[in-house]
Image (cartoon, rainbow, N blue to C red):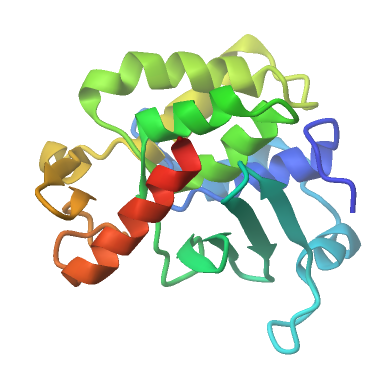
Amino acid sequence: MQLDLSDKNFCLFLLTQFPFASDDETETMLTDYLPEHFSMPPGEWWEELTGKTAEPWQGYTYVHRLNETVTFFAEFHPCETIYFFNDTYLGNTGGNFHLSLLRWTELQTLVSKDETAPSLLFFLLLPLVAGNQSERAEIEVAITNRLKEMALDLPADQIKVLTRFLSSHLIFEEEEGNIFEHTPDIGWVINRNHSERNRQNRGEDLLAINQLIGSAVV
């Protein structure tokens, strides 16, 4: 499949990959908002992307080389997207979601270095990002600008709504859960349970994922 932001179906699919996204003003989850305001991709398109069944899985894998040592993979399954750097698991968007892995500054570095499809890479990695309140203004501006590159012909008011949704996925109301802390000999950790960087994980696992992410952003 040719997957890029000129494909309206794929743009809508990308917007479904944010399980924490909600809008306090409308008391709505993004997963409910989308089918109420857009014509969602037809079933046959969805099945071509994700495969018809979880087992055996016959869906599509997006492959994006970040640098000489790290390649990003996104596997599109019927009920989840699973992310990898090389063969190392990063997280998933399914019912047992595991996200909140990357710092906002790490995403910005990865996207700024990309010379092929930076906006596509932005939306593919964004579900894995955790931000904090001090970064909110910058996050909202970046999301707004990237949404304008989608082939959805979004009016200004809808861009504003979607920006609120996506920002809420990154920034939780509980500030303590949003803050990464750099720990000696291990690297960055976070309090969010659904993260490969959760501070309660084994030290050797945290060190390995931090080293891999470090290799990706150099």
Q: Residue furthest front?
A: 68
Q: Is residue 16 above or below residue 43?
A: above
Q: Is residue 104 above or below residue 2?
A: above
Q: Is residue 148 left or right of residue 212?
A: right
- Residue 131 image offset from top left, x and y in percent: 31, 34
Quadrant, the N terminus: bottom right
- Residue 107 image offset from top left, x and y in percent: 46, 34
- Residue 87 image offset from top left, x and y in percent: 56, 68
Q: Is residue 138 visible?
A: yes
- Residue 37 image offset from top left, x and y in percent: 68, 35
Quadrant, the C terminus: top left
Give the residue at x 16% y 53%. Answer: 191
Q: Is residue 45 left or right of residue 116?
A: right
Give the residue at x 9% y 49%. Answer: 184
Residue 139 image-quadrant placement: top left
Q: Is residue 104 left or right of residue 144?
A: left
Q: Is residue 194 visible?
A: no
Give the residue at x 58% y 14%. Answer: 157
Give the residue at x 71% y 42%. Answer: 12
Residue 60 image-quadrant placement: bottom right
Q: Nearer the viewer, residue 37 or 200?
A: 200
Q: Nearer the viewer, residue 14 or 181?
A: 181
Q: Nearer the viewer, residue 9 or 179?
A: 179
